[in-house]
Image (tube, rainbow, N blue to C red):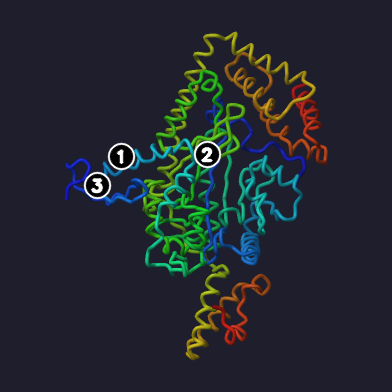
Amino acid sequence: MTPEHEIDEWLRGAGPEEDTVVCTRVRLARNLDGFSFSATQSEDEAVTLLATVRRTLSSLAEELSWTWVDIGDVSELDRQVLIERHLISRELSEGHRSRGVLYDDSDGRASVMVNEEDHLRLQVFRSGLRMEEAWEVADELDDRIASLLPYAFSNKFGYLTSCPTNTGTGLRISVLVHLPALVTSKEISKATNAIQEMNMVVRGLYGEGSHAIGDLFQISNQRTLGESEEEILRSLHSAVLRLLDWERKQRREFLQNRLFVEDRAYRALGTLERARTLSSEETISLLSALRLGRILGVMHEPSLESLNQIFLLTQPAHLQQSVGRELPPSDRDLLRAEMVRRILS
Amino acid sequence: MLCESCQENEGVIHHLELTNGEWLERLLCEECHRKNLRGEAAEQGKGAFTVIEYMGQILAQAGGSQEQGQPTAEGGLVCPGCQLSFERFQQTKRLGCPRCYETFVADLEQIFLRVQERVVHRGKVPGRPKTAAPSPLEIRRLQDNLSRAVREERFEDAALFRDQIRKLSASWGETEHEGASADSESSETEGRD
């Protein structure tokens, strides 16, 4: 694992609808025919599966210059860093059976988790709203893997997954959106209800049940069965666009009171530039105000990329990795404030 | 027959619905069926809590009493592929192997109807892989067949199963499958029930 990687693709801050959409993720759940699913899998089977996948995909991994990590072999801190980069899930990190991940370490654009809830979880990330592109890349990767390993598939139910909420296409597309104007104007619950009516799921940044820190929300498709991948893409796309229109309308109203937006953004900048300790939650919510001010053009510095850099690098594991050791939360807050000052100066 | 709800369109779907903990079956038209599913989902608070929890509620009421599986001593349904019981599926909300989809098919269709509002896949279909991957379940199935054949003194069949196991094992490579590999000599005598 490279200790100092470039900023990952999903946080590059450039792409279609970048004023409101942080990134797009496409995930495919796949299982191998002839193996038990995770719920009934023995450790022996897990070991066999991991070794088989690793061996079978080795030439593909070499061709793509991807890195293989045996999760059991890496430290807790390295696992946390992979979680913060979204390359592995918390579930994979905390699992007890043999498990691993194959990923693009250069810019974190894709990964394949092995022995998560499903045998394989393919993920592709793109910054901005780029569902089609992310899907095409995932689709091709999926085809390459399917030519090497037999998937559990039924003509009636499609790709067979461990949980029936993923059966069918096994496809979950998530779009990470930034909705500060909807949150501040308290229109957010109306907006998320409308999205749920369209059969989409709205969650906070850190997934199921998490509240929306930093005004960041994940929108994803709920249905995986009975619709083609293209149909799922299209309906999520139109739901997201509707939400973005709503947010932009609120933002325009905000701009009627430019002073309010300006004041909030500069207060946030002031705190970030001067504070001596910063918790991760405070940092994320200050970044949200700053980001809105930047996008609405009330200020011209700092760049969106440096805001994203702060977002990624000040997460607990990344901070600790930068000094090469574990730190208690109070020390992390000191280090975080220092790092933010450094990036902003 | 007319739809039991609107009494206008033709009833085409056997709609199942939970009423006071009992499954109530009605013949509905497509439109009323969808409307009912939505109403039910809203009532169950879909959105307010997660789809998984919603599925858990459906599962808690479901039967697991089809004929495809093997009943346990207590009478519950068990998947012959991985020995996952219906009770365990209810608890964990996770299936155990591809065969579970046949074993629990009726309950799964109800889950799909409610949670996904669809039952039949319409997306992509995988191409066949060029090489077969190791399959512990297939090996286990062959070992079971082998033991049964030996017990029943069907030695020609037994030899056939033994050859199949050897062939599969050989194509897996030498190192990875020791645990799952068929030591056919001992399987023949001991078997594994």
Q: Is residue B42 visible?
A: yes
- Given contact means CB atoms under 8 Å apart, are the residues at marks 1 and 2 in contact? no
Query: Under tag 2, what secondary structure?
Result: strand
Res A339 label: none
- Label 1: chain letter: B
Amino acid type at mark 1: Lys
Q: Quadrant of residue A232?
A: top left
Q: Is residue A62 visible?
A: no
Q: Quadrant of residue B177?
A: bottom right
Which residue sits at x=82%, y=41%? A324
Q: Give the residue number, with chain letter if any, for mark 1.
A: B35
At which x and y percent is residue A198?
40, 35
- Decide: few, some or many residues near mark 3? Use Cα within 10 Å; few <14, some 14-19, many ≥20: many
> Which mark is in front, 1 or 2?
1
Amino acid type at mark 3: Leu
At which x and y percent is residue A231?
40, 43
Query: Under tag 3, what secondary structure?
Result: strand
Q: Give the residue number, with chain letter if any, for mark 2.
A: A174
Front position in the image: A220 or B146: B146
Query: Under tag 1, what secondary structure?
Result: helix
At which x and y percent is residue A38?
57, 58
Q: Give the residue number, with chain letter if any, for mark 3.
A: B28
- Decide: few, some or many residues near mark 1? Use Cα within 10 Å; few <14, some 14-19, many ≥20: few
Front position in the image: B85 or A34: B85
Front position in the image: A329 or A249: A329
The residues tagged by marks 3 and 1 sit, at their Cα atoms, a distance apart of 10 Å
